[in-house]
Structures are given as C-alpha cells and as structure tokens.
C-alpha cells in the first residue's frame, strides 16, 4: 500500500475552519469517518492529516484547502442577528447547513460589489425606509409603492410559481440580491436578510412552499426597510427577546399589508358578498382569497382577523387545523437542470452580473464556476434563460 502523504497544515486553522462552519468536533469527525481523538490531535498539532484527508475537510467545511496552510485565520463575517433565538440564548447556534448558506450569501454579495466596481456600475442604497413605530398599513403601502406592483398585476399571475417569480423580479429590480437557501430545514429558518448597503440581501428557503416563500420575501424586505437584518422563522408569540418579538411581529404585519392591501381585501367579491361583519368563513371562500392574492390560507385568515372580519377564536381553530394538515411541498418538479438551479439559487441580478463579468474578462471561468456552482458548458443555457425570462423557482 502506498504510504499517505502528510499535509503540514496549521492545526489552529483546522479548528477555526470547523468552528466557523458550525460543526462540533464530534460532528466533523463523524463526517470525516475518523475518531474524535484523531481530529483533536490534528487540531492541536500533535499529528498531521494526509493530503487526502485535508481535501476531505475542505469539502466538509466548504473551504479551499489553501486556507489550512495560512499563518492565521482570515477575517470572518460578523455573526448574523438571530430572531429565532430564545431570550437569553446566545447567537450562533445555526446548523452547519444554515451557517454555510449565510456565509455563501455574504460571499456572493461581496463578489457582486466587486463586479459592479470593475464593470463601472453602481447600485444605489435601497430607498425604502420604514420605522418600527410606523402604522403597518401605511408601511405596507410604502412597500408596494416601492416595488411598483399593482393589485391588478398580482391577481393576473397564473399560479404561485409565477407570483413568486414576479415578486422576486420586482425586488431585484430595486438592487436587492434575492437568493434561495438550499438543504436547510424549514423548521430551522424560513429566510434571512443582510441589511448592509448597497446590494442588501434577501434569502428564502427553497424547501418552503411557494406561498411561504412569497410571504418570506415581503417579511425580509420589511427587515431591510427597518435596517434590522437577521435569521427569521416568522413565528410569533415564542420565548424570544421582547425587542426581537417586536421586530418579527411588525415585519409580519407589514408583509401581510403589502401582499393583501386592506381596501383590496375589503373590495374583494368574496368579502363584499358577505353580510355584515361576518366572523366565520368557509374553506372555499378562504381558498378563493388565497388564490387571488397568492398567499397561504393561514395568512389570508390572519389578514381577515387584522381587518376585523373574523375572531381570534375562529382564527386559532382554523390555524390548528392547517398545522395538522400535511405540509405543502416546496419547489418539487423532479430533478432541476444545472443552469436552472444556478438561476434559482443565485437570482437574476447576481447571475447577470457574473455573466457580464465573465464575458468582459473581469473574472475567470473558475470564478464563474465557484460563484454559480455551474460548469462552463451550461453558461449558454443560463444566458438563454436570463434573456427569455424563464421561471427561476
């Protein structure tokens, strides 16, 4: 048997890379199929891993192996505020999968900013600003005016897929990067946002149902507007810190007001034909409202509650019923083509910048492959998809 070649890596860099990727030493050892004691010895500099083992660590931690040979760790991104956390709980408890998606979003934003500079372009800071003390109905109108999407356009979208792509395109046209996180359980995070300017970031969970992703888009846009980005699960009434709960409740209310403007709901035929301040609604009526506004039945019912058209008791009753039903699927549709996957996860704004940078010889083919996770043979299909405005879900 050929002897393994030792890699003279910096043990401290192995520790940094593991911790920065969100792995405990037990998790990392299991992934690598080695004993915990061996990985500890590598990190403490008592033993050296083989070159093959270092390559495997690079794949697990999503790091180039060159980083393990540095003298000191590179600058890390600042931790993201975690609106999911319980009161008194420290930040930074996200899974390795979520941790990587957050880091990936930061890296893509940094590349997009570099590309804008070398291409001689600029992106203006996002003009939408709202305050936590604002009336959420007025804030919702500001969001919709900012995006320039009318209720007529919204109700003209044929299905949830077209609606998601429509809202996403409207947001990207305002110089906001919109990514989709993958391999992250919906139970851990529905989305997150990076409020740094210019080119702030919204990321939604591709495992979530389309109606859920639409609501997350608006929820995270509200986060950007109040300049309070972070990790979100959109749930209300948990044991999180009081100020975090205030932000989440406000962003939920603004998202609902933007997606379902009060007057548009009250003027809807289903609501108009109801007699007086009706308190209960049939599933058929709720489904009709849900389809027209392209939001979930729970969001529809919650909006009726906010507008005084149902009771808290009826809302809670139906909400329990919805929670017991099988969860709706996410993107579905079987295997996705590589070019479509790149467009789905990276978004049109980011993919377009990367293609421009490549065709104008500002970045290399290796840069493109890393940025889009896409081989060069697929670039033609990607360019066609961007030009033809095909769906990106």
Image (tube, grey):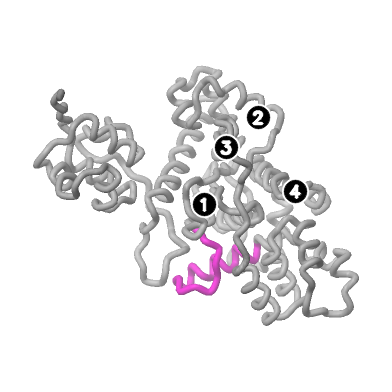
Mark 4 = which residue?
159
Query: What's the CA distance linking mark 1 and mark 2?
Result: 24 Å
Foreground: disc 1 or disc 3 = 3
The answer to which quarter of the image holds residue 54 is: top left
Query: What's the CA distance linking mark 1 and mark 4?
Result: 26 Å
Mark 1 vs 3: CB contact within 8 A: no
Instruction: State the residue at coordinates (66%, 25%).
Output: 384
Which comes sooner in the sequence, label 3 or label 2?
3
Mark 1 = which residue?
193
Mark 3 = which residue?
335
Which comes sooner in the sequence, label 1 or label 4?
4
Q: Is residue 4 above or below residue 154?
A: above
Q: Secondary structure at mark 2?
A: helix
Specify whether residue 346 is painted magenta. no
Other-residue count near label 4 (Cα within 10 Å), few / some / many at <14 / 14–19 / ≥20 = some
Mark 2 = which residue?
386
Give x and y (percent) for residue 373.
Answer: 48, 31
Query: What's the CA distance linking mark 1 and mark 3?
Result: 28 Å
Foreground: disc 1 or disc 4 = 4
The single residue placed furthest to the front in the displayed view is: 1
Query: What's the CA distance linking mark 4 and mark 3?
Result: 21 Å
Instruction: State the residue at coordinates (22%, 41%).
Output: 13
Give x and y (percent) for residue 124.
Answer: 59, 40
Q: Locate residue 374 relative to residue 18 in the image: left or right.
A: right
């Amino acid at each position: 048997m050929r002897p393994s070649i030792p890699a003279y890596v910096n043990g401290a860099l192995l520790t940094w890379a593991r911790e920065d990727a969100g792995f405990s030493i037990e998790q990392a050892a299991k992934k690598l199929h080695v004993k915990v004691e061996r990985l500890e010895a590598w990190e403490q500099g008592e033993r050296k891993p083989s070159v093959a083992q270092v390559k495997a660590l690079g794949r697990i931690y999503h790091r180039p192996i060159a980083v393990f040979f540095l003298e000191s760790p590179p600058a890390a991104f600042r931790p993201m505020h975690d609106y999911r956390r319980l009161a008194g709980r420290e930040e930074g408890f996200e899974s390795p999968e979520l941790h990587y998606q957050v880091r990936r979003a930061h890296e893509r934003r940094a590349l997009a900013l570099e590309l804008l500079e070398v291409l001689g372009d600029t992106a203006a800071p996002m003009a939408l600003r709202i305050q936590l003390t604002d009336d959420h109905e007025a804030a919702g109108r500001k969001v919709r005016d900012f995006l320039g999407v009318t209720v007529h356009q919204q109700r003209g979208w044929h299905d949830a897929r077209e609606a998601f792509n429509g809202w996403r395109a409207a947001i990207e046209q305002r110089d906001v990067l919109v990514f989709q996180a993958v391999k992250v359980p919906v139970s851990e995070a529905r989305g997150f946002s990076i409020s740094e300017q210019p080119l702030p970031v919204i990321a939604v969970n591709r495992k979530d149902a389309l109606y859920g992703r639409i609501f997350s888009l608006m929820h995270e846009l509200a986060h950007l507007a109040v300049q309070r980005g972070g990790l979100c699960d959109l749930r209300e009434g948990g044991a999180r810190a009081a100020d975090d709960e205030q932000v989440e409740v406000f962003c939920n209310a603004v998202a609902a007001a933007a997606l379902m403007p009060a007057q548009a709901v009250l003027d809807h035929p289903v609501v108009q034909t109801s007699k007086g301040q009706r308190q209960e609604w049939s599933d058929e009526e709720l489904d009709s409202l849900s389809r027209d506004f392209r939001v979930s039945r729970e969001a529809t019912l919650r909006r009726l509650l906010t507008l005084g058209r149902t009771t808290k008791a009826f809302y809670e009753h139906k909400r329990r019923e919805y929670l017991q039903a099988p969860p709706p699927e996410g993107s579905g549709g079987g295997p996705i083509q590589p070019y479509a996957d790149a467009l789905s996860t990276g978004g049109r704004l980011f993919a377009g910048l990367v293609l421009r940078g490549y065709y104008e010889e500002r970045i290399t083919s290796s840069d493109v492959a890393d940025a889009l996770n896409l081989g060069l043979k697929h670039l033609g299909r990607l360019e066609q998809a961007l030009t033809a405005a095909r769906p990106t879900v």
